[in-house]
């Protein structure tokens, strides 16, 4: 990608973790999670890695928790089946 002069690109599984070794700067979220899915190349050619999946997952979970669910019994349990979120965070 460096040879191609790309200004940025997306990273998909299974490379989200291994791309960290090739970045010049890693965003705190990407560092904490141990994965980056977005790479932005600045005007000096410095590669910055971000994990935008984390923000998307947080927003999605918050929306899920704020959405009223009709109750069919007295349960306070909510199950979310989203394996893509688990891989992102």
Image (spheres, grey):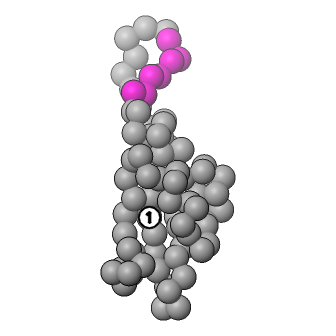
Q: Look at the image and tell me whether residue 11 can be seen.
A: yes
Q: Residue at image x 43%, y 8%? A: 73
Q: Quadrant of residue 71?
A: top left
Quadrant holding the C terminus: top right
Q: Residue at image x 60%, y 74%? A: 24
Q: What SS does tag 1 mark? A: strand
Position of residue 65 measured from the top left corner of the image (x, y, whole percent)? 48, 36
Residue at the bottom extreme?
A: 43
**Residue 78 is one of the magenta-drawn residues:** yes
Residue at the front extreme?
A: 3
Q: Is residue 21 left or right of residue 8?
A: right
Magenta segment, prevailing SS (helix, strand or loop): loop
Q: Is residue 29 above or below residue 82?
A: below
Q: Is residue 81 left or right of residue 74?
A: left
Q: Residue at image x 39%, y 59%? A: 11
Which residues are the magenta region? 75-81
In the rendered image, which residue does mark 1 sit on?
38
Q: Is residue 11 above or below residue 80?
A: below
Quadrant holding the N terminus: bottom left
Looking at the picture, tell me which residue is in the foreground, 22 or 8: 22
Position of residue 26 measured from the top left corner of the image (x, y, whole percent)? 61, 67
Q: Residue at image x 48%, y 36%? A: 86
Position of residue 35 measured from the top left corner of the image (x, y, whole percent)? 54, 53
Q: Look at the image and tell me whether residue 63 can be seen.
A: no
Q: Quadrant of residue 27?
A: bottom right
Q: Is residue 74 above or below residue 43?
A: above
Q: Is residue 26 above or below residue 69?
A: below
Looking at the picture, tell me which residue is in the foreground, 89 or 35: 35
Count numbered badges in the picture. 1
**Residue 65 is one of the magenta-drawn residues:** no
Looking at the picture, tell me which residue is in the foreground, 19 or 56: 19
């Amino acid at each position: 990608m460096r040879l191609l002069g790309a200004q940025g690109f997306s990273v998909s599984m299974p490379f989200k973790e291994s791309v960290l070794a090739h970045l010049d700067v890693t965003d705190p979220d990407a560092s904490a999670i141990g994965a980056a899915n977005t790479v932005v190349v600045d005007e000096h050619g410095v590669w910055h890695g971000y994990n935008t999946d984390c923000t998307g997952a947080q927003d999605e979970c918050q929306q899920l928790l704020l959405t009223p669910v009709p109750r069919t019994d007295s349960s306070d349990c909510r199950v979310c089946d989203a394996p893509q979120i688990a891989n992102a965070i």
